[in-house]
Image (tube, rainbow, N blue to C red):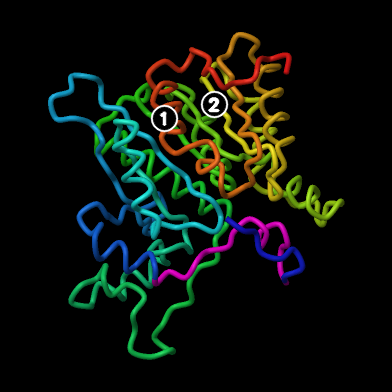
Amino acid sequence: NSFCTLLAMGNPISKFAFYPPNPADAKRVLTGRFRRNHEIIFTAKGNPVSMVRFSGRRAASSAPSRVIIFSHGNAEDLSNAAYYELIAHQVGVDVIAYDYTGYGLSTSLREYQIAQGHENPVAEAGCFSSAAEQPKRPEPTEEDCFACADAAYDYARSRLNVDEQNIVIVGRSVGSGPATHLATKHQGVRALVLLSPLKSCANVAGSVTGFLLTPIDLMCNESKLRKLSDTPVLIIHGTEDKVIPFEHAKTLAKVLRKKAVNRATFLIPVQGADHNDVEAVFGQQQFANVLRDFIANPTTPPAQALTADD
């Protein structure tokens, strides 16, 4: 998950936050192996949102249906669908993951509508007979990103009939922004999990460059989390993260504990891990076990978590 250059034209913070991969990879994956797991849903404004859903629950299980809504990082998309399938099976819950507008098959409404004229609208999305016919792919924005997160949440509540207390919000890297947006908007959710989260985009830029480039900021998690009531929160972050320094995680944990002293707020440092290898260093199975146990008992401290005094 790499951030693009801060010296790009336009709003540098926006360029810093969003870096969509080549959509051809997501198209290939979502129209191939994971075709049956893929669906197009829509934001409140009618923009298409590409999403996948995986079930990790055993058919005979009598446990309540629990769903993870996963918001990915800034240089990721649903071409990584196999990862969400793995999490669903390892943790034993349903997983919904989605692409932000401008990522993968989360195209503009016009592009989606044009694609409907093809024999296979999803498979042919983004394929046009001429450059003139090809609509411009929308640029990701914070507003659209949050709207896509809202659409995924509404899908879980309305289409899957999942109770709010059985929804777990997970966000990785820049995805901690839409995850925090959802958790503060729907304070009855079961838990919030932040993986390598940021205080805000401007703070990440400042960590990299030594100064802030613009007063315009995005993904202001530090200020938003001050509004969170008593939702349990788990933060996992690499101690050697060179993209979003570990200090971001420590600050967010401190903010959460100050807001609600009795809240279950847990911070797990992954010693030696950088930004993109947290689960590899931590151990994929151990990561899944921690996530599974936290979802089952979100007020019980994980063995690996720092104490409030650390």
Residue on which disc 1 sits:
168
Is 15 in the magenta?
yes
**Residue found 51% across the figure and 38% down from its top:** 179
**Residue 62, located in which quarter of the rendered image?**
top left
**Residue found 59% across the figure and 48% down from its top:** 174
**How far apart, in angstroms, are the residues tagged by discs 2 and 1?**
11 Å
Residue 38 x, y percent position in the rendering: 27, 55
Q: From the viewer's side, name the closer residue of 113 and 2.
A: 2
Going from N to C along the chain, the mark reached first, 2 or 1, is: 1
233 left or right of 66 in image: right
201 left or right of 45 in image: right
Mark 2 residue element: strand
Which mark is in front, 2 or 1? 2
Residue 149 x, y percent position in the rendering: 45, 45
- Three-letter code, disc 1: Val
Residue on which disc 2 sits:
234
Q: Is residue 141 above or below residue 223?
A: below
Q: Which corner quadrant holds the N terminus?
A: bottom right
Residue 62's disc is: none
Q: From the viewer's side, name the closer residue of 288 and 122.
A: 288
- Three-letter code, disc 2: Leu
**Residue 233, located in which quarter of the rendered image?**
top right
Check disc 2: other Cα within 10 Å, few if <14, some if 14-19, many if 20+.
Answer: many
Q: Which corner quadrant holds the C terminus?
A: top right
Is 170 in the magenta?
no
Stretch of the chain drawn in magenta: 9-24
